[in-house]
Each structure stands twice: as structure tokens, then as C-alpha cells.
Image: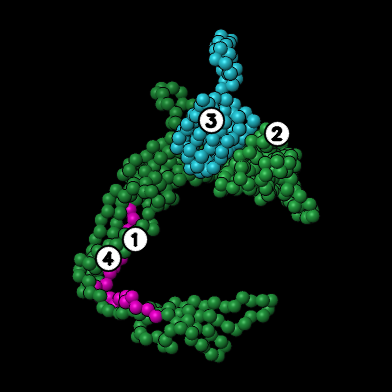
Amino acid sequence: MLIRVFWAYMLGFLVLVVKGEHPERFVNLATMRGVVLWDVISINPETTLVKVAARSFRPLRHIARRTNVKVRIRVKGGLPFILYRLRGRWMLACGAVTFCLLLCLFSSLIWTVNVVGTKQLDSAQVLRLAASAGMYPGNLRLLVNSKDVADRLMKEMPGIAFAEVDFRGTQATIRIYERVLPLSSLGAANVVAVKDGVIKDILVLAGSPQVKDGDVVRAGQILISGIIAPLPPPKTEGAPQTPPPKYEPHYVEAQGIVRARVWYRSYAEAPREEVVEQKTGRFTSIVSIRLPNKEIIIKGPANIPYLLYDLTENKRKLPQWRNITLPVEFVTIRAEEISRFLLRRSYDQALHLAEQQAEASLAGQLPAGVVVTARQSKVINTDLNHVGVQLTVETLEEIGSTQQFAPPSKVKINE
Amino acid sequence: MPKDMKNLEYFLAHYLELPKELVMGLPRITVLGDIQMVVENHRGIIEYTTERVRIGTGIGEVRVTGTGLALRTIFPEEIAVDGKIHSIELVSEK
């Protein structure tokens, strides 16, 4: 069925109006003569619509004459008729063909090249190398072998562990998986405190500890030293006194975890009485055109009818053309009425507010993700008009940081 | 056709396992629900309106009544009738 419809479209078909007393006879005779009819639909007892292949129309005329019906073409459909109509408009056909060709051409170009996955490596360098292998915007996709580009990237950039090139439409994506290089040793280094605090626990992985649990440390103090002192020589009694062999200290990169209790403190005070401004919800809008020495109000009152108000002005100028600017501005003013009143707070309300403010200022000091182990809020400096609160929080955090130092020359550094 | 001849055709078709509709010139009518009917081995259309289609066959006529009936395809061996079919009737030749 579908194939027949396809061929009917390709070879052209006609929708005929058959008028006469006996359209059945016409249909039967046509079928007997080998003319295939389809979609025979009766509109009324004397009129029938029939579809027929365009090339079968000529024999139908004789059949129509013999069966005494009138045949009229209502629709000419299919490709040959469309082409016939386009015959005089060859530029249109050229345009369609050109469009298809350009579409094919542009869709086979590389439009963009993206690099994904670079952390240490320079994306621009990857792009340059890929471009030298042929993968650059504007090149034909067919000319680029993605495997060759990936191989070349892996061969010429030692920092790449694996590379793959993926095409999606006109977009090429270079996916880079970087080689993870072993961390280079810092050489001799200490672990020093970055903050003041009291040591809670210390775990030494390398180096010699300089502090113990419960010690108070200041920022910058060495917690784990990178200098390992030599062991004292074994004492042997009665042995002849020989000069002890010269031991030299070892220098290492000190490593370890030092956790300490750290305190943060902030102070805030809240007034018991305060003049507060609040919007009443009433507002007025004024739309005007402002000229250099005149203002024309289009909409809204000439003066703002409120005693206290908050103004929002929105100015719009006409677009500038070359160096000509018209001195006309469209101004929209929105005035919101404000009421001012004295707010009295009870002692508890003021305390709560002060605590909230202290908490907010402390939040800025605390490092992200730190666990607060204790908090204390203390009222200091209170009078009739103010309540001052000091908030202290205790946290447990890692305070060690590695700091390099230069060991004396000609010594062995253990890595 | 004499009755003996009919029996002979049936006998041949039966024992030689030939399609009976071809050997005996019988129509093969296929009905798809109430929306389509295909008559193979027909002898032309006797009447066609959107409410009634009569198709001639070797054993008489097939009468189809319904609404919106249309002849979807007409080949020398096959006619397909589409539409809402209400009844199909076989009117055999006396």
C-alpha cells in the first residue's frame, strides 16, 4: 500500500471527478482494461472521486466515452507536476539545490573545538597541538582522524595519560585525562601552627614533636620539627674515653596531624530604643519626560504627596547615534511612603538581637566546615539604652601547616 | 456449471491440495473488524454508493451496507472496501 502511494507520488497521479449515471460501469471497465483505480469515494449518486496514475488517463477517456460518463481532472498531484510547475522558475530550484549543498557542506565542517578535563595542562596548548594535527574550526570533519589526533596529543604532551576525541555534530570535544604525577618532596620542612590554640591531640608521621597535649601554642610556633636530633651515644663504663663519633642531625619533611581547641570571640550590642523606618505600602509613580530645562509629567502627581518617602528613579535615554545624543530622558519615579517610629525593645529582645548580631559577625570568622564544640554568650556592658553581648565559641580544628626551611648545607636530607 | 463438474473440481482441489478459490472460481472474502473488507476473485462492481456496495462474484453477489463506504483499491483480482460496515450479505445465484 505504502509502496503504491510512493510510486503514485513519484510518477504523478490525478484525482478525477466522474459524473454520470453508472460510475460502476466506468470503474469495472477501467479495471478490466488494466487501469488501477484507488480511493474511489462517492460524493453523491452521480458523482464519484477516483484516483488514478497520471499515465493511465489517456485510455480512461475512451472508457468514459463508452460508459457515458464525464471525467474531469480535479487535482494533479505528485512529483512530475511539481517539477513541471518549477520549470519556469529555475532559480528557485537552483536555490533549493544550493541550500542543500551548503547545508551538507556546513554540517560537515568542524565549528568548535572544546577541551575538557585539563587541570594542570594548558587548554590553549592542547588546542594548538590539535590544530596542527588538523583539528581546527573550519576544517572538514572527514579530513580529521580523531584517533590520530588523540595519539598525537598523547605522544607529544607527556602530561596526558589518555586523550579521546569525540564528535557531536559540528562540535569536537577533546577529553583529556591528565597524568597524576607523584608529589615532589618539599625537602626539609616543619609543621607550624597557623592559629593560636590549645593542643588537643597530635599524631606525628615524620619529624620530631615539639609540643604535647594541653600545650598552649601561638600562631607560627613549630609543632613538629623537621630536624631529627642524633641519638646520644651509648654510655659504656670503663671503656677508654674515645671522642664520640660526630652525629649530624637529619632533616626531613615533617608530617603529622595536630588538632587543637581554638576560640573565636565576637562582640555586638543592640540598642533598647531605636528609630525605625518602615514602608507603609502606599506608593505613587510619576512618569515624566525630562528636557534640559523643563520636565513634562505624563502620568502621576506633580509633587510627591508624602512627608517621608523612599525614591527609586529609573532613567531611560534615547539610543545614541554616532556622536548625537538627544537631551531627552524618560524618567519613571516610584516614591514609597515611609513611616518613622520609635521602637522600644525589652531587655530580652535586645539581648536576643545582640546575640544574633554577634553570631552573624562570628560566622564570618569561622572557617568553613568547622565543628563548634562549645559556645558561651556573656552579657557585658549593659545599661538602660544598650545590651552588649560577647559570644565565644570553641572549635576543634587542624592547625598544622607545612613550612619549608633551608637546612644547613652539606647535610643529608631524608625524603 | 453442472453439479458433477463442481464435484470433480472439489475432488481435484482437495486431493491435489490446490487453493479451492482458484480451482473452483470462488471469491475469498476477508473482513477486518467492521472497517474493511477485501474481496478477491471478484467479477466487478454492480453498484456503489457510500451506503451500499454490491460486488459480483462467481457464486452471486456480495452486498455490503454501511456508512462512508469507499473503494480503497480496485485491481482485476481484488477489491478493498473501507468504511463503517454494518452488514455483509451473500446473495447466491439461483
Residue A61 sits inside the magenta stretch: no
Both marks 1 and 3 on one chain:
no
Type of amino acid at the residue the image marks with label 4: Leu
- Tell me which numbered mark, 2 or 4, is placed earlier along the sequence: 2
Chain shown in green: A
- The range drawn in magenta is A263-284
Type of amino acid at the residue the image marks with label 2: Arg
Residue B56 visible (yes or no): yes
Q: Position of residue A401 (x, y in %)?
A: 45, 45
Crowd around label 2: few <14 · some 14–19 · many ≥20 (10 Å): few
Q: Which residue is mark 4?
A: A353
Q: Which residue is mark 3?
A: B61
Q: Secondary structure at mark 2?
A: loop
Quarter of the view holding residue A224: top left
Label 2, label 1: how many angstroms apart (C-alpha)?
A: 97 Å
- Tell me which numbered mark, 2 or 1, is placed earlier along the sequence: 2
Q: Secondary structure at mark 4?
A: helix
